[in-house]
């Protein structure tokens, strides 16, 4: 009798466990589908600055225009094709009906040319106009083969356009998709363009785009003694602003040389607040191929200042990490040259680490993988390199890691500076955080 009762209870427990597990999986999949559908719904209602030509084209009319953009500077436009006749199965006419409008996507450069705007020059940031160059690769000036327009590189030794390079320009247009991180250099290119425009009395129009990290503010605030092209301003790693809002902050805080201010016009995003999920329609650079990489970028980019690879030279850039010195980890990969990484870190050498490509979305900045890699590495003496302090914006983070502080202890040390930054940030917001 006892064995029968035990069998029944075991079977009941097994049934409840399986049913609960299946219900949870179903709920998780359903939630994932709902979130995905939400993102798609938001994408259709959001209008970027570039998708509002009725606002900015009048500002460009009869002007000689320069544009700082790359492959992320795209715009959608709708073509209505009229009516068509509907017939029944016997070929008899039934009615006329509207043909659904078609949505086309094209480069903002091609769009402006089609609108007969007098474009004179294209200015390109890191990774080049087509967005295929390696991080840090020297890009030369050239000519766009599709339009014949001259391209001026604003990366390498020439990060700020010179007076000669701006000669003949009446108004500048800026259209780049940022990813919301201090060390992503598009906001540094924005700074130098604003400065050059202010010094040469050229108005600047910024076509705004959503921040894929939303309103998240997190990370250590940069100390100005550690200023570089991967961090120019006293802001945290995640600043929680769109590039248009950020341009207003640069102007308002007088961060440009000698306190000059640009004649700035922002074309805001329509129907947008920062709680909306936003999936980038085009990868912003060669090593950020998808939403997962963009989400993990701010947490894994610190590895650029260490002897750890974050997946350059694989097809999972910024979704994996590893090094030859982490042999007690199970996941392995071997970096090899590919688009955006002609000579990746640990080229051809087997690396041990973790695969985060199935990791759930994180809202802030996570230090867990950096701390784990430092703890597990077999060579702590070469773990950090000189670039780490520039990425962190402070020498405190490296010292905290070397002392063995926990993530919570490190993050608590950021709170005072973050609160101060948030108060400054409030003055320049164009969109609700929620």
Image: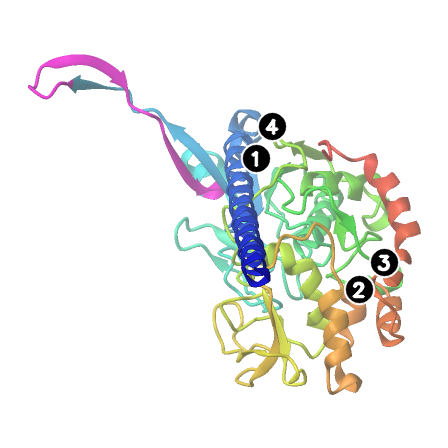
Q: In screen coordinates, is 373 left or right of 418?
A: left
What scheme was used to colour the molecule? Answer: rainbow
Q: Nearer the viewer, residue 428 or 154?
A: 428
Q: Secondary structure at mark 1?
A: loop
Of labels 4 and 3, the one closer to you: 3
Q: Secondary structure at mark 2?
A: helix
**Could you give the CA–CA distance between mark 4 and mark 3, rounded to whole angstroms?**
33 Å
For label 4, count other residues whose C-alpha is less than 10 Å away and answer few (under 14), some (14-19) or many (20+): some
Q: Which residues are magenta?
A: 87-109
**Could you give the CA–CA distance between mark 3 and mark 1, rounded to whole angstroms?**
34 Å
Q: Sequence-wise, which precedes: disc 2 or disc 1? A: 1
Identify the residue under disc 1. Answer: 48
Q: Sequence-wise, which precedes: disc 1 or disc 4? A: 1
- Could you tell me which quadrant the N terminus lies in? bottom right
For label 3, count other residues whose C-alpha is less than 10 Å away and answer few (under 14), some (14-19) or many (20+): some
Identify the residue under disc 2. Answer: 392
**Could you give the CA–CA distance between mark 3 and mark 2, rounded to whole angstroms?**
13 Å
> Residue 235: x, y in percent?
82, 51
List the single residue furthest toward the right: 416
Q: Secondary structure at mark 3?
A: helix
127 versus 313 height, above or below: above
Identify the residue under disc 3. Answer: 411
Magenta segment includes 101: yes
Label of residue 271 in the image: 4
Q: How many numbered marks, from 0 up?
A: 4
Q: Sequence-wise, which precedes: disc 2 or disc 4? A: 4
Q: Secondary structure at mark 4?
A: loop
Q: In screen coordinates, is 108 left or right of 146?
A: right
């Amino acid at each position: 009798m006892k064995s029968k009762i035990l069998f029944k209870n075991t079977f009941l427990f097994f049934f409840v466990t399986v049913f609960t597990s299946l219900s949870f999986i179903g709920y998780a999949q359903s939630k994932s589908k709902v979130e995905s559908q939400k993102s798609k719904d938001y994408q259709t209602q959001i209008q970027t600055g570039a998708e509002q030509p009725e606002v900015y084209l009048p500002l460009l009319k009869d002007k000689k225009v320069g544009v700082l953009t790359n492959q992320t500077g795209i715009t959608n436009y709708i073509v209505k094709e009229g009516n068509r006749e509907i017939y029944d199965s016997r070929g008899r006419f039934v009615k006329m009906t509207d043909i659904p409008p078609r949505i086309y996507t094209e480069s903002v450069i091609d769009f402006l040319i089609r609108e007969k705007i007098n474009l004179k020059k294209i200015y390109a940031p890191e990774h080049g106009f087509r967005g295929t160059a390696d991080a840090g690769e020297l890009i030369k000036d050239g000519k766009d083969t599709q339009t014949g327009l001259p391209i001026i590189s604003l990366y390498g030794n020439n990060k700020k356009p010179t007076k000669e390079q701006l000669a003949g320009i009446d108004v500048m247009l800026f259209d780049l998709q940022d990813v919301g991180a201090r060390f992503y250099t598009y906001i540094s290119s924005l700074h130098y363009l604003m400065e050059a425009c202010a010094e040469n009395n050229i108005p600047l129009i910024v076509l705004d785009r959503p921040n894929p990290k939303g309103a998240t503010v997190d990370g250590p605030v940069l100390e100005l003694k550690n200023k570089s092209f991967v961090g120019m301003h006293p802001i945290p790693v995640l600043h929680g602003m769109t590039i248009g809002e950020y341009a207003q902050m640069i102007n308002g805080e007088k961060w440009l040389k000698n306190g000059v201010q640009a004649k700035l016009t922002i074309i805001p995003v329509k129907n947008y607040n920062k709680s909306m999920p936003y999936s980038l329609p085009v990868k912003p650079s060669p090593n950020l191929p998808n939403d997962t990489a963009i989400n993990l970028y701010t947490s894994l980019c610190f590895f650029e200042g260490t002897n750890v690879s974050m997946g350059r030279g694989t097809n999972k850039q910024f979704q994996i990490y590893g090094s030859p010195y982490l042999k007690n980890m199970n996941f392995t990969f071997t970096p090899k040259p590919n688009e955006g990484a002609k000579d990746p870190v640990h080229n051809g050498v087997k690396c041990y680490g973790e695969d985060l490509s199935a990791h759930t979305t994180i809202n802030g900045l996570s230090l867990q993988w950096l701390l784990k890699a430092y703890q597990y590495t077999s060579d702590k003496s070469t773990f950090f390199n000189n670039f780490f302090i520039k990425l962190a914006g402070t020498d405190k983070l490296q010292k905290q890691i070397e002392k063995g502080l926990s993530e919570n202890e490190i993050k608590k040390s950021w709170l005072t500076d973050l609160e101060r930054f948030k108060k400054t940030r409030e003055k320049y917001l164009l969109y609700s955080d929620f």
